[in-house]
Image (cartoon, rainbow, N blue to C red):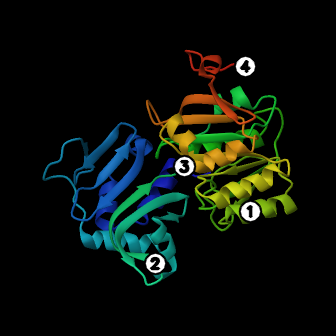
């Protein structure tokens, strides 16, 4: 599996030379704390760490206050970085750019925004990239322990993992796959991970760089609908894990699996429980009557913090969301089984 240094080197490999050399001055703790590297045209380089955003001086020192000594990113450096991210083939990556991100080796997700140009068929292409956000992918073992200890000891519940951006949804799903597949629960669960963007497994040449468990099959770059069909026909999974459901097509893929007796853990963007309840894709999932729990994550006081756990009960046309934190989470962070 990849070390922190290996992951950092992967990220630096796509960054323009001058900025790369400055970033190489970061010490081990700075590298470990680093979550995002943000580059904007003619604006200061920004690092996002566990303690928030900061600037970087040309000596590799972090500072919360901007000054003339802080590194400023040029248009040419943005262009060089984008070319490296796309392996010098912008054309073959145009659709990814239009969608707002490219996933590079190691599962690191790079957000790209610029100027949208409307086409005659009402689609658009994005050009003149002005901002680049590199989100560093990490495998953190144990971040789903509260969830598995509380919910997965005697059953395989259908579970929704929700939270705002950068709250740790992908990291939690990655660890959940590892734990349920590796015997941390009541058995070594046959697990399929649908890695549509390559972030969960960080596979290179078909070999996962992240450990997703002893009994896990990984479908890389498949659409979710296609992946479910193949998994049902070929892999007989007990549990399927999706990252970021966003469309009715994704929901229909889940319904297909549910009707075949497969259980799911899926993630979705939501600021809080009220936001989650209002999402149509979530309403569609809950209406199936299959989903058991919704887990709300937070980045405070640290990424992957379990903020709330809700038990979902569907009775006729009524949906009850029961906050069971008081039953699950003790003051010392330990857990005990559900009694509701």
Badge 2 is on which residue? 122
Give 319 or 162, whichever is nearer the viewer.
319
Callout 1: SS: helix
Looking at the image, is mark 4 or mark 1 earlier in the sequence? 1
Q: Residues within 10 Å of mark 2 (few under 14, many from 20)?
A: few
Badge 3 is on which residue? 3
Q: Residue furthest top?
A: 331
Give 290 or 67, whichever is nearer the viewer.
290
Q: Height in image: 220 above or below 118?
A: above
Mark 3 touches mark 1? (CB < 8 Å): no
Query: Of discs 3 and 2, which sits in the foreground?
Result: 2
Badge 1 is on which residue? 227
Badge 4 is on which residue? 340
Q: CA distance from mark 3 to mark 2?
A: 44 Å
Q: CA distance from mark 1 to mark 2?
A: 29 Å
Looking at the image, is mark 3 or mark 2 earlier in the sequence? 3
State left or right for residue 261 relative to residue 39.
right
Mark 4 touches mark 1? (CB < 8 Å): no
Callout 2: SS: loop
Q: Quadrant of residue 247?
A: bottom right
Q: Is residue 169 visible?
A: yes
Looking at the image, is mark 3 or mark 1 earlier in the sequence? 3
Q: Height in image: 320 above or below 192?
A: above
Q: Residues within 10 Å of mark 4 (few under 14, many from 20)?
A: few
- Counting from the top left corner in percent of width and height, residue 278 is at 54, 43
State left or right for residue 64 relative to residue 10.
left
Q: Residue at x 21, y 64 (%)?
A: 42
Looking at the image, is mark 4 or mark 2 earlier in the sequence? 2
Looking at the image, is mark 3 or mark 4 earlier in the sequence? 3
Q: CA distance from mark 3 to mark 1?
A: 30 Å
Q: Residue at x 53, y 48 (%)?
A: 138
């Amino acid at each position: 599996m990849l070390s922190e240094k290996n992951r950092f080197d992967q990220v630096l490999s796509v960054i323009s030379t001058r900025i790369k050399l400055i970033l190489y001055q970061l010490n081990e703790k700075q590298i470990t704390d680093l979550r995002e590297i943000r580059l904007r045209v003619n604006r200061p380089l920004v690092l996002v760490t566990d303690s928030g955003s900061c600037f970087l001086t040309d000596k590799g020192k972090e500072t919360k206050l901007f000054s003339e000594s802080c590194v400023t990113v040029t248009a040419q450096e943005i262009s060089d970085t984008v070319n490296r991210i796309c392996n010098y083939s912008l054309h073959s990556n145009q659709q990814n750019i239009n969608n707002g991100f490219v996933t590079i080796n190691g599962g690191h997700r790079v957000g790209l925004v610029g100027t949208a140009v409307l086409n005659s068929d009402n689609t658009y292409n994005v050009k003149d990239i002005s901002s680049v956000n590199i989100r560093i992918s990490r495998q953190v073992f144990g971040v789903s322990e509260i969830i598995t200890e509380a919910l997965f000891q005697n059953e395989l519940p259908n579970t929704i993992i929700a939270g705002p951006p950068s709250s740790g949804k992908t990291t939690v799903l990655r660890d959940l796959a590892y734990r349920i597949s590796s015997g941390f629960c009541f058995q070594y669960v046959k697990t399929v991970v649908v890695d549509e963007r390559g972030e969960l497994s960080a596979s290179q040449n078909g070999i996962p760089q992240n450990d997703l468990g002893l009994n896990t099959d990984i479908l890389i770059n498949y659409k979710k609908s296609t992946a479910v069909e193949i998994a049902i026909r070929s892999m007989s999974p007990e549990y399927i894990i999706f990252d970021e459901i966003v469309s009715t097509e994704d929901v229909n893929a889940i319904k297909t699996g549910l009707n075949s007796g497969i259980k799911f853990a899926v993630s979705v963007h939501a600021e809080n429980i009220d936001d989650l309840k209002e999402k149509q894709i979530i309403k569609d999932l809950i209406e199936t009557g299959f989903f058991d729990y919704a887990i709300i994550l937070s980045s405070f006081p640290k990424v992957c913090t379990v903020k709330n756990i809700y038990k979902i009960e569907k009775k006729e046309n009524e949906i009850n969301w029961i906050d069971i934190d008081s039953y699950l989470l003790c003051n010392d962070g330990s857990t005990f089984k559900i009694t509701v």
